[in-house]
Image (cartoon, rainbow, N blue to C red):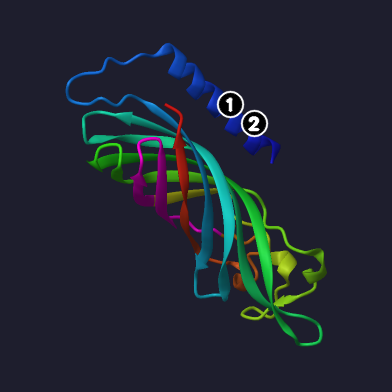
Amino acid sequence: MKKFLFAFFLFSSAVFYSQENIEKPIDSISQSTDKLGLKIGLNYFGLQGNQFETQDELGFNVGLIFKTDLSKHAGFLYGIDIFKQYFSVEAIDLLGRKENVKNEFLAGQIHFSFNYSLIPNHLSIFAGPAVQFNSKLDYDNRYKNHQLVAQPSLSITEFKEVNRFNFIAQGGIMMGLKNIQVFLNYQYGLSNFMAPSKDQQNPDKEFKANASTITAGLVFFLN
């Protein structure tokens, strides 16, 4: 977690420095300059795979976004986000009772998008790639002896490893006032979210699933 926070503050410092030292002339085509924004939102995270049943769960995210204009309508969005994400997997205890066990993890994401303004400063759409860095899955320790319903030979403890890096395709929309806007974003993981199995003798431990996330929230542009 300390590494994620360090990257977050390092990025914010670099952005503030560039804002103070780079001036762009305002031309007759566009009255907008580079903008720095603060993001807060909620995210709905889930896994798409056919080896086990999962349930999407609600999490939250914060971040920084940097907007630069190439013309009146076209430009780029890029930045960094910190996510707290959750999902549940169906498991069974020693007495045969089924429960949805909530898993959680921390993630840091760097994103870059092409942005097109349908109504400058008020309505825009964007799309582009992102890379996400994930922590291990965590869960309530009282579930450590539960077995997965879809894979009865495996316990919850064998399910906690995920790929630390995921490549993502994402896109969305922003709308609102000049300095306060609502955003809606959909993300789909292009790489396997689950970590490769360390036990080559048991192919049942080779989980495959793609992550999908819907995020919504507010952006506060500071200039």
Between 208 and 60, the residue placed more toward the observer is 60
Question: Tag 1, which secondary structure?
Answer: helix
Q: Position of residue 135 (x, y in %)?
A: 65, 49
- State left or right for residue 85 relative to residue 191: right
Q: Residue furthest bottom?
A: 96
Rendered position, 149 above or below 144: below
Type of the residue with mark 2: Phe
- Identified at 54% across, 27% down, the residue is 12
Q: Where is mark 2, residue-wise?
A: 6
Where residue 32 sits in the image (x, y, percent)? 29, 26
Query: Residue visible at 65% across and 54% down?
Result: 105
- Specify the amino acid type for callout 1: Leu
Residue 199 inside the magenta-drawn segment: no
Q: Nearer the viewer, residue 113 or 201?
A: 113
Residue 93 lies in what quarter of the image? bottom right
> Do tag 2 and tag 1 residues touch (Cβ < 8 Å)?
yes
Residue 130: percent from left, percent from top: 43, 44
Residue 10: which numbered mark, if any? 1
User: Neighbour class for label 2 at 10 Å: few (<14), some, many (≥20)?
Assistant: few
Residue depicted at 29% across the width and 29% down the height: 69
What segment carries the magenta color? 170-193
Q: Which mark is residue 179?
A: none
Q: Report the Cα–Cα distance between label 2 and label 1.
A: 6 Å
**Image coordinates for residue 187, horizontal then vertical, percent:** 42, 55
What secondary structure is found at the residue carrying circle 2? Answer: helix
x 39%, y 28%: residue: 35
Residue 188 lies in magenta, yes or no? yes
Asked if residue 174 is positioned above or below residue 59 in the image, the reply reads: above
- The residue nearer to you, when weighing 177 against 35, is 177
